[in-house]
Each structure stands twice: as C-alpha cells, then as structure tokens.
Image (tube, rainbow, N blue to C red):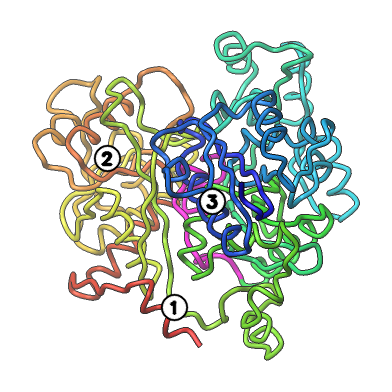
Amino acid sequence: MSKKPTVVILGSGPNRIGQGIEFDYACVHAIWGLQEEGYETVMVNCNPETVSTDYDTADKLYFEPIVYENVLDIVEKENPVGVFVQFGGQTPLKLALPLKEAGVRILGTPPESIDRAEDRELFRELLLRLGLKQPPSGTATSLEDALKVAEKIGYPVLVRPSYVLGGRAMRIIYEPEELKEWIKEAVQVSNERPILIDKYLENTVELDVDAVADTEDVLIGAVMEHIEEAGVHSGDSAASIPTYSLPQEVVLKVKEYSKKLALALNVKGLINIQFAVKDGDIYVLEVNPRSSRSVPYVSKSVGYPLAKLAVKVGVGRTLRELVPEVFKRIEEGNVHFASDFLPADFPYYTVKEVVFPWDRFPEEDPVLGPEMKSTGEVMGVDKSFGLAYYKAQLSAGMKLPSEGTVFISVADKDKPQVVDIAKEFSNLGFKILATRGTYKFLKERGVNAQMVLKYSEGRPNIVDLILNREVDLIINTPSGKRERSDAYYIRRVAVQERVPYYTTLRASRAVLEAIKEYRKVGGKLEVYSLQDIFSNLS
C-alpha cells in the first residue's frame, strides 16, 4: 500500500467525433505532473486506444465508464485527497457538482464556477457584471417557443440541442421553415431537453484562448485566430498562433477579457474561452473552465505543457513558483501583455489544420459547419503565416498548387468578397473557371474567367474536369441549402480525386497567401524543430 497521497483523474471515455485524443493528452500530462509532485495517480477511463490507459502511465488504472456510480465506488476504495474533472473534456465535467454534493473533494476549479460557466442564465449575469458582450440568445422547450425566440433574435440563428457534445445536430438556420424542419428531423424538444438558440454573427472572426490560472495570476497560453469564419465548429477550424489579421488593440482586449473571466470564475487550472470579433466589437461566445481540444496545439506552440502546469496549480502550487522565468520577463517589460508565456518578438507562426475522415464516409457532404466532423489535427511552423499554413495543408494531405487552374463557385452572399481573391489568383497566372452565376459576377468586375457547366447542366461539366485532373484548386462556399446540390457532387469528387478544396472565403484567402509565400521562396521549405525553437528562447 502506497504512503503517497492519492489523486483520481477522470478521463474522457470513448473517443468519438467531438471528444477525442486531445483530452487524453491532457490527462497524461496531468498524471506526469502529479507524479512529479509526489502523488500516487489513479486514472479512470474506458478506452483501450488511449495512452492514459497504458499499463505504465498512471500508478493505478480503473478501466470503467465515466459515470457517477462508478466514480463514487472508486473514490470509496481509493480514499483520494481529491478528484480532477477538468482534463477529460465535457464528460467528467458534468459530474463535478453531483460528486461534490456526495462529499467528494473536487481539485482545481470549484464545481460552482464550472456550473456558472455552464448555466446560461448565471453566465449571462456574470458577463453583464463584467461589462462584456454576448450575442443575443434564448432557449426554447417547444417548436412554438423556438419560432418566437428566433423571430425576436433575428435570423440567421445558430441552433443546437442542449445535451450534445461536439456540436452534434447544430445548424445555422436562415428562415422559419428551415427551423421547423430541423426540429422535426434532428431533435426532441422538451422542458428536460430545451434547445439553445443564438444569433449567428455573419462575417466575423472567431478566436480561441487557452489559459492557466491560479486564482491570483492568469497566464495566456495563446490567442488563436480561426482561419474559417465563425459558425464553423472550433474543432473543425484551422487556427493560427499568433493572430494574423487582427489589429493589436483587439488582441490586447481579448487577453484582458480572458483574464477578467478567469479571475471572476475563480479558475484554478485550465480555461478555454471563445470570442467573436465583428466590426471591432468583441463578443464572448463560450467559456469552458477545463482542458480544451486546443491544449496540445497551444502547448507545443508556446513550449510550456499547460495541462501539467494546471494540475500542479490544482494541488496548491502557484504559477509564480512553477514558471518564474515568465514572470521575470513580464517584470522586465518584454511582453506586450502581462499574461503572455512568450516574448512579444517571438518570430514564428504555428498553424493548426484539421484532418477529416471524408473518404471513409462516401455519402457525407464534405462541408464545414457548426457540427464537428474532424478526427485529427496537424501543425505547421514557419516564420511567416503563409508558409506555416502551407506546411499545415501539406501535413493534412492537401498539396497546394503553385500554378494551374482554380475553380470558383460561391454563394450569392460571398460573391462580392471573392472578386479580389479571383483577381489575385489571375494575377499569379492561374486560369479561373467558374459556374454561370459566379462567372457572370466576376466577368462584370474585370476578372478574366471562363464559364463551366454545373453537374446538372449537361456535359462536359465541372465534375468531368475534376475527374480529368484539369482542376488544381477548388473554392466552393455552400448556399445554406441542405439538399444534394451540384456543389455536393463537386465536393465529393474533390475528396475522391484529392484536389484541394475550401468552403470558406477566409480559408481561400489563407490559401492564396500560402501559395504566394511558397512561390516567393522558390518552393524551398525550411524545417524548424520545436526543440531548436525553444532552446534558443532567452
């Protein structure tokens, strides 16, 4: 029998789309951190594919489902000093309050703070008190309620069930008929299972922040700028550290707001916050006082293991004890905000790109939206955003062309913004193909394009050209309609033939930047190892 104090860590349960290996990473680093602090570690998880369930990771492993009764039995047997719920994602987080009410000590962020971030009304009150903005929102327990709330908020709205993970069944709704159809097909609405309705902010930039707090100090791991527009699930969006298109004053405000929220919620450990920026205004979308999917990416990008720091904070250490060099740098004034891990002149960009299983699901429409569909992620590192993004695309299996033919077909709402993108591709020497509506719009604005038939308009059409390898890059934004459209067949054949394709304009602009940078260096990419980057960091 060990004489060391025991700590229980709850894992994320089975890996599935929406909650996967990123949380296992956090659990393993938490185990290592506790072992460094002299604790015996007990891991509770039920997935044989994870590192946290390897026989030599934790001191003890309970291969059990993450449910209330099982955890209580394990706590009774092991008699730990406490239980961590913040490293396994949403599954263990739901057990925080019930376990505390049963007399179990929850280490790290208090369950009441977790509940305040999870409960819509409590969270709204907190934001009002802090003077922070939130998109208009409401809840509905029936179809009639939902129609009234959506009408009051104003279309388009983002709707989702209140009991799911990874954005499953989330949808952007543009009109009442679409809302009726979604409720009829996708969800059961009741008092026990209300649906959540938020105003969908179009043409916004979404940001993610991961931070570690000890109730006194807050260290921002990173502010990540999503490359896709707000409305694409954060788990499916590529992201850049540092931000690449926002004014510095906006980034500074986001850091300031993140610090306010972490301290107001009495966070002791990890916190993830999602923001949207529209016309200079900053909106808080969501706060999760736990590990997030982006913790591994941020940890590798800044050279500090956030989960390991968070678990040590959770058992009583302070950030000033754990990373004194960061606070020394802050005191010397070499960072642009008093909560950054990295110096202001850090010369690298890291870009996360996600990997999708589209080729495993031949009937699935490979388009991005609020429902998470990715199953993995990769990272590119370079001294410019364009080259880091290029490397990330390459790692995800998308070989970007440096010349050739670009096919463009976009929704009406995106046509004005795609003109500059098409012009720049044309100036680089690319041939531009477009379907009738987009072709007409581009031609009228001076873009040298050629028209190609849609799949439904006869032959030879765009699908034929893709199959014949006559298209090197596809820009195709969805119209919002869900039926199997011409665009569906374009996207499916692009997956089949491994032609790079992008369904948002922000991603298309990033691709353009990547190709320009790649051509500038003559197609020669430098390799930067993380070990070398951080060993040279003063």
Structural crowding at the residue carrying mark 1, measured as other residues with C-alpha within 10 Å and reported as few (<14), some (14–19) or many (≥20): some
Q: Which residue corresponds to mark 1?
A: 534
**Is residue 161 found left or right of 61 in the rendered image?**
right
**Is residue 485 found left or right of 28 in the rendered image?**
left
Q: Amino acid at mark 1?
A: Phe
Who is closer to the viewer here, 349 or 179?
Answer: 349
| Magenta highlight range | 226-247
Who is closer to the viewer here, 528 or 126?
Answer: 528
Query: Is residue 150 visible in this depiction of the protein?
Result: yes
Can you name the residue that lies furthest to the top here? 184
Q: Decide: marks 1, 3 in contact (CB < 8 A)?
A: no
- Residue at mark 1 to residue at mark 2: CA–CA distance: 46 Å
Structural crowding at the residue carrying mark 2, measured as other residues with C-alpha within 10 Å and reported as few (<14), some (14–19) or many (≥20): many
**Is residue 337 found left or right of 12 in the rendered image?**
right
Q: What's the residue at 18%, 47% (across, down)?
A: 472
Front: mark 1 or 3 = 3
Secondary structure under badge 1? helix
Where residue 273 sits: x, y (%)? Answer: 67, 52
Q: What's the residue at 47%, 47% (across, down)?
A: 237
- Residue at mark 3 to residue at mark 2: CA–CA distance: 45 Å
Secondary structure under badge 2? strand
Q: Which residue corresponds to mark 3?
A: 26
Front: mark 3 or 2 = 3
Secondary structure under badge 3? helix
Front: mark 1 or 2 = 1
